[in-house]
Image (tube, rainbow, N blue to C red):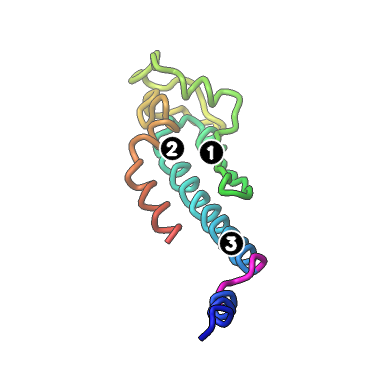
Amino acid sequence: MSSEEKGKVFQWSLMGEEDIKKLLKNYDEKLNHRLGTALSRVGLYIKREAQLRVPVDTGALKNSARTKVTRRKNLKSEVNISFNTNYAVHVHENIRQAWKGRPRRGINKAQKRRRGTYWDNGGPKYLERAYRENIAEIKRILREAME
């Protein structure tokens, strides 16, 4: 085989630049889709864990939890978890828990006397703790979704 023939064999076995770009684009799209799915699962998991830790009086704060996945190219997608009431930040940052353990006062929306005590089923930093206390599970969800 002459050197010219060897060069042709080698040249034919290589993929063209456009083929490589197309293959990488398809791979990137699949990876971005998987990342979006993984972030959605993680967001829903953290939201549920935070809802279990949020203090409940009327249930408005607990029910205001939302997740939103923003899908972007180049693996820059993100997930936002939020509680959407006027007082969500105040409750989240209320380290003192001034009335903790005191019986609830007043009448609820159903015109019944409130039961239980303040902060009996939740605490401050409910969203932050939901993340920090479940890092191993979050990594497992991410790993599972990306495989």
Please report whichever mark, 3 or 1, sits nearer to the chain's N-terminal start. 3
> Do labels 2 and 3 touch, CB within 8 Å?
no
Q: What element carries label 1?
A: strand
> Could you say where residue 17 lies in the image, as x and y percent from the top left?
64, 65
Q: In this view, does 26 lie to the left or right of 107?
A: right
Residue underneath mark 3: 24
Q: Residues within 10 Å of mark 2 (few under 14, many from 20)?
A: many
Q: What stretch is highlighted in magenta?
A: 13-18
Residue at figure coordinates x 39%, y 46% from the top left: 138
Q: Quadrant of residue 126?
A: top left
Compared to residue 145, the image places residue 14 above or below, namely below
Q: Nearer the viewer, residue 86 or 127?
A: 127
Instruction: Please name which of the two marks, 2 or 1, marks the residue nearer to the observer.
Output: 1
Q: Residues within 10 Å of mark 3 (few under 14, many from 20)?
A: few
Magenta span contains residue 2? no
Residue annotated with mark 2:
50
Left or right, residue 62 beside residue 18: left
Query: What residue is at 58 percent from the left and 62 percent from the top?
Result: 24
In three-dimensional space, the C-alpha distance between marks 2 and 1, rounded to whole angstroms, equals 10 Å
Disc 2 to disc 3, how far (Cα)? 38 Å
Q: Nearer the viewer, mark 3 or mark 1?
A: 3
- Mark 2 or mark 1: name the one nearer the start of the chain: 2
Q: Residue 37 carries which label?
A: none
| Residue ID at (47%, 29%) | 57
Residue under circle 1?
81
Secondary structure found at label 3? helix
Q: In this view, does 32 lie above or below 116?
A: below
The C terminus, quarter of image:
bottom left
Q: Earlier in the sequence, mark 2 or mark 3?
A: 3
The kind of residue tagged 3 is Leu
Say above or below: 65 vs 124.
below
